[in-house]
Image (tube, rainbow, N blue to C red):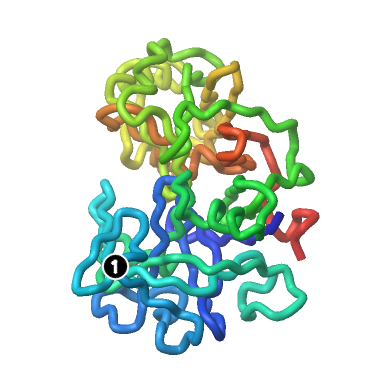
Amino acid sequence: MSEVPLCEGVGTHYAHIYVGTPPQRVSVIVDTGSHHTAFPCTGCKSCGKHTDPYFEPSRSSTLQKLGCNGCVAAARCVAKTCQVSQSYTEGSSWKAVQMKDSYYVGGDDVSAPPRAGEKWLSTPFVFGCQTYETGLFRTQKADGIMGMSMHAQTLVPTMRADNKLGHNSFTMCFMPGGGTMALGGVDERIHKQPMQFVPLAKNSGWFTVQLKDILIGGKSIGIPEATWNTGKGTIVDSGTTDTYLPRRAADKFKQAWHAHMGPLPKFANSKLAYTAAQAAKFPTLTYVFAGGVQVEVEGKAYMEKAGAGRWVPRVYLTEASGTVLGANFMENHDVFFDAEHRRVGFAKADCDYHHAPGGP
């Protein structure tokens, strides 16, 4: 198992990895809602300014440019290269050319390239060299994205197939300011309670679970179970900052919120005025999953401070179908993405990498 420190960007968490020979540092959002890994390369004219310089393929002696017989993950052959693109619901997008090179993860000192005898793991890995970015991909702190879905071409199954990891599983533990990620297993030493496991509702693609109910302040909001799980179902998506519930749950959610907090201000995803005493009453949201597993999300995780006496709820009641449990749902929990045993685990945890027994 390999432990990886995480940093916090603008609403997202990212890891520093190294690519190529000699290794070049790249920062990538850790995203269970995607199966692509991609970051800007030299020559991109619209890729924004990020944490690290653009990756320079010409500097790496181990880089392989893939021919059309080597394209993976829905890439298509254009002008004898493997081209891939991705668009996201919030409006951002990117285009890239697929390449393959040595890919390093797991070192304690992210400011120093991998050295012999350290904790770095490496494997040959296919990624997208971005040639174009729009929207949040241009303005985010992290250089690019590392897809961590259950797709066979993502990093963890690739490292497992290369015998660099003992298991096809990983954990993410998010906290304000950073967190920790473990590849190939789970580090129970950071847990504050025993881990509870929810079976996966699907065997491929996103990490989809069966959501049965949501409680506000300990009381069910009274929505039929099927409402949460229609369409794509309920997905645990580390790359989405906020949590998105179906529109059909909006009225009942607001009624339960106002029963707990009072009728004014009305629940909305805008700056709401609350006194300090009211803010202390922000309810715990309890997500109830198959098997009776409960995950409690405190107000400080989903209510964003927006100035003196102002707060913005970051639970949105806007999904056409299904549910997206984003990074603020995961906060202060170690979340175990266990594709090998078709389950997701949850445990309250101390997510600070520097406090963790495996940290520096």
User: Residue 257: x, y in percent?
Assistant: 42, 21
Q: Residue at x 35, y 68 (%)?
A: 98
Q: How far from the left and from the top, in percent, is residue 82? A: 29, 67
Left-right relation of 110 to 326? right
Q: Residues within 10 Å of mark 1 (few under 14, many from 20)?
A: some
Residue 334 in percent (x, y) is at 64, 42
Q: Dot 1 lies on which element? A: helix
The answer to whether residue 308 is visible is no
Task: Classify residue 196 as left or right of residue 42.
Answer: right
Q: Residue at x 66, y 47 (%)?
A: 167
Q: Name the residue located 19 percent from the left edge and 74 percent from the top edge.
A: 79
Residue displayed at 48% across by 74% down: 101
User: Is 34 situated left or right of 250 in this image?
Assistant: right
Looking at the rendered image, the quarter that the C terminus falls into is bottom right
> Quick one: 74 or 187, which is closer to the camera?
74
Q: Amino acid at mark 1?
A: Cys
Q: Split into 4 quadrants, where in the image is the N terminus?
A: bottom right
